[in-house]
Image (cartoon, rainbow, N blue to C red):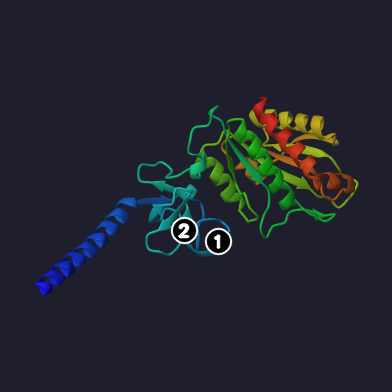
Amino acid sequence: MKCNQMTLCLFFFIVFALSSVVISEDVHAIAAKTGEVDTQTSLNVRSGPSTSHEVVGSLTPGEQVAYTDNGDGWGELVDGSGYISLHYITNHDGEPVDRSSAKHDSVPLNNERIVLDPGHGGKDSGAVANGLMEKEIVLDIGKRTRDILENAGFAVLMTRDEDVFVSLEERTAMANAWGADQFISIHANGFSNPAANGVETYYFPGSAAGKHMAANVQNQLVEHTDRTDRGIFEESFYVISHTTMPAILVETGFVSNADDASQLADANYRQTVAEAIANSVIDD
């Protein structure tokens, strides 16, 4: 009798184990999605779900892929070779699979989507002078601006929120895929002449909406920072010429100028700059 009971228990254990495997495989199959790479060049495959992870491979434009959606803007390839940004994947219905991280999936209170683009990052320090690195200054300003805008009900996507290198193509592709309403690239200036100082803003040539944005943010910066008003200018910088929405590039001061640099190094000044940028959006 004991033998029969043990045999029966063993039988049920094996059945349960096999069922668990089948269920697990079914769940994985249901979670898997397919799509194709939607880039002009190649798409990096990384060792983890963020741009801070190592590039371990690449996919070609139009290549078909199968992946599981992490819900954070990244997908894991089902073949186990790595992770891809879902900003560059289009599903078979012709719609982007995931236009941003889950944090930005909800509809903003005022239906406005703003992309903030802190320049440079990672291996690209940007302008360096007076003990300051542009990439660090503008990332801090970007985060402060994001917090203000999100508290005001805007949906905000940052092209980077840590010290990582993001290509110009990746930055504009993020904004275009997300369907942003405005794109604001944040920078700090540097020049061989240390006397150069002040704030200035650029917009794409011929863009009336871009000119309007540039004038708004420039007026806010000059009013609230008391820095020299260098004006607004037309320019075809990559990030404002390859975005499909109105876009501007803001220069928040010169790290190469001693006075500007002392201000940029001050957290209070960076907060003031962030408020000026945010107010140019909120008050528009």
Sequence-first disc among 2 and 1 = 1
Q: Nearer the viewer, residue 229 or 42?
A: 229
Q: Nearer the viewer, residue 177 or 283?
A: 283
- Give the farthest residue toward the top: 284
The image shows residue 255 at horizontal and vertical percentages of 82, 49
User: Quadrant of the rendered structure where residue 267 is?
Assistant: top right
The image shows residue 139 at horizontal and vertical percentages of 69, 48
Q: Nearer the viewer, residue 266 or 203?
A: 266
Crowd tier of the residue under label 2, counting other residues whose Cα lies within 10 Å: few below 14, some 14–19, many 20 or above: many
Q: Residue at x 53, y 41 (%)?
A: 176
- Give the farthest residue toward the right: 195
Q: Which residue is mark 2?
A: 83
Q: Is residue 94 above or below residue 23?
A: above
- Give the farthest residue toward the left: 1
Crowd tier of the residue under label 1, counting other residues whose Cα lies within 10 Å: few below 14, some 14–19, many 20 or above: few
Q: Is residue 251 left or right of residue 109?
A: right
Q: Amino acid at mark 1?
A: His
Q: CA distance from mark 2 to mark 1?
A: 9 Å
Q: Which residue is mark 1?
A: 53
Tell me, yes or no, if residue 213 can be seen here.
no
- Give the farthest residue toward the bottom: 3
